[in-house]
Image (spheres, helix red, strand yellow):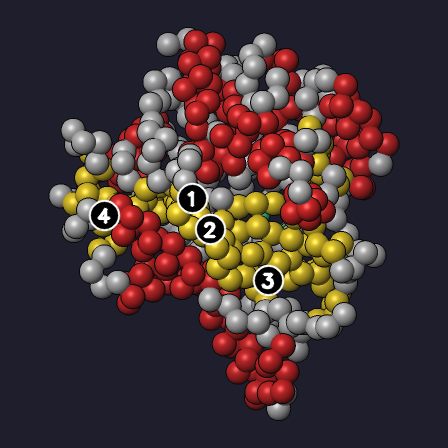
Amino acid sequence: MGQSKRRRNGSADLARYAEIGHHAGIEVPSYGEPVCKAHAVLLVETSGDQQYSLGIRPPWASFQGDTETLSLGLFRSDYLMQNPDSNSIKQVEFNTVASSFGALSSYLRDMTRYILRQLGQAELLKNMPENRALSGLCSGITEAYDLFGVPGSVVLFVVEEVSYNICDQRFHEFEISEKRPDIMIYRRTLTEIYEEATLNDKKQLILDGHTVAVVYYRSGYEPAQYPTAKEWDARLRVERSTSIKCPSIHYQLAGTKKVQQALAAPGVLEKFMGAGAATGRVRDIFTGLYSLDFDESGERAVDMALADAERFVLKPQREGGGNNLYGADVREALLRMRHSRERAAYILMERILPPLVSGYVVRPGAAVPPPLTDLVSELGIFGVIIGTKDKIYCNRQAGHMLRTKLADANEGGVAAGLGALDSPFLLDM
Ligand code: ADP
Ligand code: MG
């Protein structure tokens, strides 16, 4: 099938799977099709000759799914405090796939409490909020399992070939197994799913003779995790099945930077939340988010960024850290892409300037004792949601994660070695 035909069919079929973007209903003139931003994300990636650095590339010309199927979201919304207006927070991004550190952050609080007691500072413990992220996130999986309601069914964790985050990830399995010994958990890579999992005539996903109730992705969010067509086929097979996916493709798309930017556009939030005070409070956590489409506002955004690149971050549709551009690199990239379609695959975001705190970072191989350094912290709030297109079964907060990094590091990736996990200490201000 030719590229252009595949592109057109793919976008039509995916239309019903990107509800948030779809409701945004924005035309993307450069493709000549009335598609939403989320579709644009997919279209740019699949649009023929060039492969831009985007996150999802489903070659699913005939993707047919079932919008009645439940989706499970184990989300993490990340925030930085905004300086000098230091009592307000701004959203960095919204993670809808493989949101990590729920387990380590839950255990870290116990470690920090122990250290405070050892230091004779036990009176400070009351200022450290409880963190039940691990049990909260796992209860989402077991609740979805129960809603699936097929006796003897199993939970499938989709894992990477080599997982660098194994110490976080496996605790989810252990927690589920402790609380629900009746639930069998499988771990498989996408390649193994391609080889081993099948769809039966009821569209149930069958693995090792068992029906899969919940598919929980800790992989599948970056292009390298789909090295061949097999992994895409595996993802499509799962997506077509009746299993509850965490995330489903539409939840995953809702977590793209493009959708984050589309939601911040004037009037879009109101379509979902009405015009009440709550909508204003949500909007207050957005910082400036700009499309780089080929239209008047896109051109304005390019000019604005070129005039003062230090004020912005340039973001492609990628996850996992290390992909964004800052400062002089924003300028250089925009000059290079200004007249290329690649530009629309990025969004422009105002740079958040968090307040500095002094502290120590403990890391392997560093000086002992560590030097006192300027640090900034990023707070992640976990959430669990289960729902269909029409009905939400649960929607709750499920704990937190704090990452602290050197103030002069652009990104705070813990796995990348740039940040460290931390615990919040609450103060009355
Ligand atoms: P990823 O999906 O790769 O994690 P993020 O949007 O979370 O992408 O960006 C990675 C990191 O870059 C964040 O954790 C944060 O430290 C930094 N960052 C991202 N956006 C901004 C911003 N607008 N202002 C300041 N720092 C940012
Ligand atoms: Mg992030």
Question: Ligand 2: does it lie within 8 Å of the C-beta at label 1?
Answer: no
**How far across and down, in percent of the image, does residue 184 sit?**
22, 55
Front position among marks 4 and 3: 4
Q: Residues within 10 Å of mark 2 (few under 14, many from 20)?
A: few
Indicate the amino acid at tag 3: Leu
Give the mark nearest the N terminus, 2 or 3: 2
Q: Real-space Cα distance between discs 4 and 3?
A: 35 Å
Q: Quadrant of residue 266?
A: top right
Q: Residues within 10 Å of mark 4 (few under 14, many from 20)?
A: few
**How far across and down, in percent of the image, does residue 337 sit?**
70, 23
Indicate the amino acid at tag 4: Gly
The quadrant the N terminus occupies is top left
Tag 3 residue = 402
Give the mark nearest the N terminus, 4 or 2: 4
Q: Which mark is residue 149?
A: 4
Indicate the amino acid at tag 2: Asn
Tag 1 residue = 392
Residue for point 68% across, 22% down: 293
Q: Residues within 10 Å of mark 1 (few under 14, many from 20)?
A: few
Q: Is residue 105 above or below residue 17?
A: below
**Are circles 1 and 2 on residues that touch, CB within 8 Å?**
yes
Residue for point 51% across, 62% down: 399
